[in-house]
Image (cartoon, helix red, strand yellow):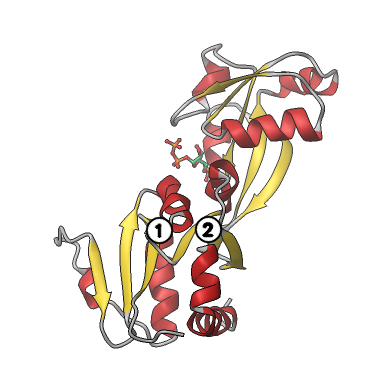
């Protein structure tokens, strides 16, 4: 263990980062600089605990962690599955709970039931492909979208979507529904594989302190 070395955290911007910082505060790790909404700084340091933090786009967090630019990261399980990087997933943080689902108009149920060759729109093409090809053994055409995926079936681009459902209100307001559930999702802590060996003590202590709160 090298206690002079900074451990670096990559946090997915937005709600996940705020909830992670709140969790860290509960174990006595604060980063006041990060709370300043007007700051344009990208990297924040906690000298006392020899920690560094930076905010990144969610889908980039596993990349920073895989390459060791960050020792640890916090990101949604959806991103971990879609990015498929070589990182250790060590902890379910329990917040950001939602579900990955196949959704569409009620009439699309038949198409799923009969394994029709349908069009599936998603921000998560890897998750969609894995679900239809490997779990359901159904050949489908996957169309990658970057957001507002619910539009897909509404404007005739796709028969169904694979997307995150939290409260279900986006689906409801647009006349769509959950047709099949793929998996539950929540925020997870990930660790670089080399850091896990080199900084085992510090990382394991952090994990067990946070685990007690989850
Ligand atoms: C996510 C997701 C759904 C919505 C689900 O979209 O893609 O559209 O939230 O939440 P609900 O079940 O509580 O209505 P996000 O807000 O991240 O934006 P996006 O559509 O641009 O991906």
> Is residue 190 visible to us here?
no
**Where residue 153 appears, x then y in whole percent?**
58, 19
Q: Nearer the viewer, residue 1 or 131?
A: 1
**Where residue 172 appears, x then y in whole percent?**
58, 34
**Where residue 68 appears, x then y in whole percent?**
42, 60
Secondary structure at numbered mark 1: helix
Q: Quadrant of residue 55?
A: bottom left
Q: Nearer the viewer, residue 25 or 74?
A: 74
Q: Residue at x 59, y 26 (%)?
A: 175
Q: Is residue 63 above or below residue 11?
A: above
Q: Residue at x 58, y 57 (%)?
A: 186
How many callouts does the rendering have?
2
Q: Report how far apart the C-alphas of labels 1 and 2 lie in the structure.
A: 8 Å
Neighbours of disc 1 within 10 Å: few (<14), some (14-19), many (20+):
few
Q: Is mark 1 within 8 Å of ligand 1?
A: no
Secondary structure at numbered mark 2: loop
Q: Is residue 123 left or right of residue 69?
A: right
Q: Residue at x 50, y 76 (%)?
A: 198
Tag of residue 126: none
Q: Residue at x 44, y 45 (%)?
A: 59
Tag of residue 15: 1
Q: Is residue 193 above or below residue 211?
A: above
Task: Decide which of tag 1 and tag 2 comes sooner along the chain.
Answer: 1
Neighbours of disc 2 within 10 Å: few (<14), some (14-19), many (20+):
some
Provide the residue designation for mark 2.
96
Q: Is residue 17 left or right of residue 45?
A: right
> Is residue 69 visible to us here?
yes
Q: Nearer the viewer, residue 159 or 210?
A: 210
- The quarter of the rendered structure image containing the C terminus is bottom right
As drawn, which residue projects farthest toward the right? 114
Q: Quadrant of residue 106?
A: top right
């Amino acid at each position: 263990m090298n206690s002079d070395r900074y451990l670096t955290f990559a946090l997915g911007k937005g709600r996940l980062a705020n909830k992670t910082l709140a969790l860290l505060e509960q174990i006595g790790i604060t980063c006041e600089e990060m709370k300043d909404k007007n700051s344009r700084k990208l990297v924040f340091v906690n000298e006392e605990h020899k920690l560094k933090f930076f905010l990144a786009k969610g889908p980039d967090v596993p990349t920073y962690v895989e390459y060791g630019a960050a020792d640890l990261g916090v990101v949604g399980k959806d991103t971990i599955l879609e990015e498929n990087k070589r990182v250790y997933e060590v902890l379910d943080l329990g917040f950001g709970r939602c579900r990955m689902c196949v959704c569409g108009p009620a009439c699309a149920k038949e198409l799923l039931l009969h394994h029709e060759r349908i069009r599936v729109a998603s921000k998560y093409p890897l998750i969609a492909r894995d679900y239809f090809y490997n779990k359901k053994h159904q050949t489908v055409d996957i169309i990658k979208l970057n957001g507002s995926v619910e539009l897909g079936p509404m404007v005739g681009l796709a028969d169904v979507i694979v997307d995150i459902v939290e409260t279900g209100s986006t689906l409801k307001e647009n006349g769509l529904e959950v047709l099949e559930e793929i998996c539950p999702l929540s925020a997870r802590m990930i660790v670089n594989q080399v850091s896990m060996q080199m900084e085992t003590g510090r990382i394991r202590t952090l994990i067990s302190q946070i685990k007690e709160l989850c």
